[in-house]
Amino acid sequence: MTGPWIEVCGADDIDEEDVIRFDHDGRTFAVYRSPEDTYHATDGLCTHEKVHLADGLVMDGIIECPKHNGRFSYRTGEAKGAPVCVNLKTYAVKVEGGTVFIALS
C-alpha cells in the first residue's frame, strides 16, 4: 500500500530537469522533474556524507552530489558513480490538479 500522500509543491515550481528540496516531519527529500515531464522523489541527503542533493546538478536522469560529485539515478535511486556506493531510497510521486505529492511509506 502506498501512502500517506504528502503535498510537496505546485508542478510548475520545479523546472524541467531540476530538483527541489522538500522537508517534512524531520526528514529531507529531493523532488525532480525530468525532461519528459515526469516527477520523481528520493531521499534528500547523499548516502556518502549526508549533503543536500537539492544543491547538486541534474542532467540526463542523474543527480550529482555537490560535495564529491557522486552520482545517482533519480528515477531508481541507483548509485552510479564513486564515491557513492549505497543507493538512495525512492518514493512514489503523483501529480493531481497541478500539485505534486509524494508517498511516504
Image (spheres, rainbow, N blue to C red):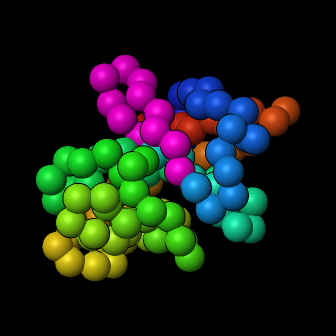
Quarter of the image with the N terminus is top right
Task: Answer with left or right where residue 41 lies relative to residue 15.
Answer: left
* Residue at point 53%, 71% (across, down): 59
Residues 73 and 90: in front is 73
State the image coordinates of residue 47 (x, y, percent, origin top left): 21, 56
Span of residues in magenta:
19-29
State the image coordinates of residue 87 (x, y, percent, origin top left): 29, 65
Task: Answer with left or right where residue 39 lies relative to residue 24.
Answer: right
Residues 56 and 88: in front is 56
* Residue at point 46%, 39% (across, down): 21
Q: Quadrant of residue 64?
A: bottom left
The answer to whether residue 14 shows anywhere in this view is yes
State the image coordinates of residue 45 (x, y, percent, origin top left): 29, 47
Q: Residue furthest right?
A: 97
Identify whether 101 is placed above or below 7: below
**Magenta run includes residue 27:** yes
Task: Answer with left or right where residue 64 lies relative to residue 4.
Answer: left
Task: Answer with left or right where residue 57 lies relative to residue 52.
Answer: right
Residues 66 and 87: in front is 66
* Residue at point 31%, 58% (across, down): 66
Residues 105 and 69: in front is 69
| Magenta: main secondary structure | strand
The answer to whether residue 43 shows anywhere in this view is no
Identify whether 63 is placed above or below 33: below
